């Protein structure tokens, strides 16, 4: 996670409380990471928990992705970042004039 993403998440938590991410698989805003108040996006058997960020305040921030999407990205290193602009999805940062995005690179072959 970049510092810009971490800063925005801190601001969003003050408004929305605990948060969660789900990596969209093509709906709404393409394949953007979508940020929701924790529990507002219902995960199921078709989703996997990629990991959990532990934020500086100790809050845990789960990051989910559909199993099918993971099959495409399982060989990449993913970094959560934020840029200026407004996505077209339901992610909570949209009113801030920002949008989360994933920067990816292939994993090293080690």
Image (cartoon, rainbow, N blue to C red):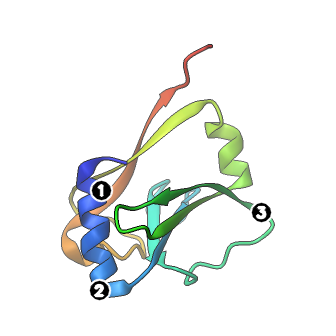
Residue 86 visible to the viewer: no
Q: Residue at x 55, y 84 (%)?
A: 40
Q: Residue at x 30, y 72 (%)?
A: 93
Q: Quadrant of residue 104?
A: top left
Residue 24 visible to the viewer: yes
Residue under pointer 1: 5
Residue under pointer 2: 15
- State if disc 1 and disc 2 touch (CB < 8 Å): no
Say whether residue 26 is left or right of residue 57.
right
Which one is in front, 5 or 92? 5
Q: Secondary structure at mark 3?
A: loop
Query: Is 1 rendered above or below residue 48?
Result: above
Which one is in front, 50 or 27? 50
Query: How many neighbours does mark 3 have within 10 angstroms: few (below 14), some (14-19), or many (20 or more)?
Result: few
Disc 1 versus disc 3: nearer the observer:
1
Residue 106 lies, in percent from the top left, at 53, 25
Say whether residue 102 is left or right of residue 73.
left
Residue under pointer 3: 46
Q: Earlier in the sequence, mark 2 or mark 1?
A: 1
Query: Is 71 rendered above or below residue 28?
Result: above
How far is the residue under mark 2 from the one under mark 1? Answer: 16 Å
- State if disc 3 and disc 1 touch (CB < 8 Å): no
How far is the residue under mark 1 from the one under mark 3? Answer: 26 Å
Q: Secondary structure at mark 1?
A: helix
Disc 3 versus disc 2: nearer the observer:
2
Q: Quadrant of residue 52?
A: bottom right
Residue 85 lies, in percent from the top left, at 21, 60
Q: Earlier in the sequence, mark 1 or mark 3?
A: 1
Query: How many neighbours does mark 1 have within 10 angstroms: few (below 14), some (14-19), or many (20 or more)?
Result: some
Q: Residue at x 30, y 47 (%)?
A: 2
Residue 46 lies, in percent from the top left, at 77, 63
> Could you tell me how many numbered marks the image carries?
3
């Amino acid at each position: 996670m970049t510092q810009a993403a971490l800063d925005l998440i801190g601001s969003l938590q003050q408004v929305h409380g605990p948060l969660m991410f789900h990596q969209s698989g093509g709906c709404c805003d393409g394949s953007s990471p979508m940020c929701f108040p924790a529990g507002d996006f219902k995960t199921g058997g078709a989703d996997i928990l990629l990991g959990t960020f532990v934020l500086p305040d100790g809050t845990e921030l789960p990051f989910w992705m559909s199993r099918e999407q993971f099959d495409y990205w399982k060989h990449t290193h993913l970094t959560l970042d934020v840029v200026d602009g407004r996505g077209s999805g339901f992610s909570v940062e949209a009113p801030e004039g920002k949008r989360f995005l994933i920067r990816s690179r292939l994993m090293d072959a080690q």
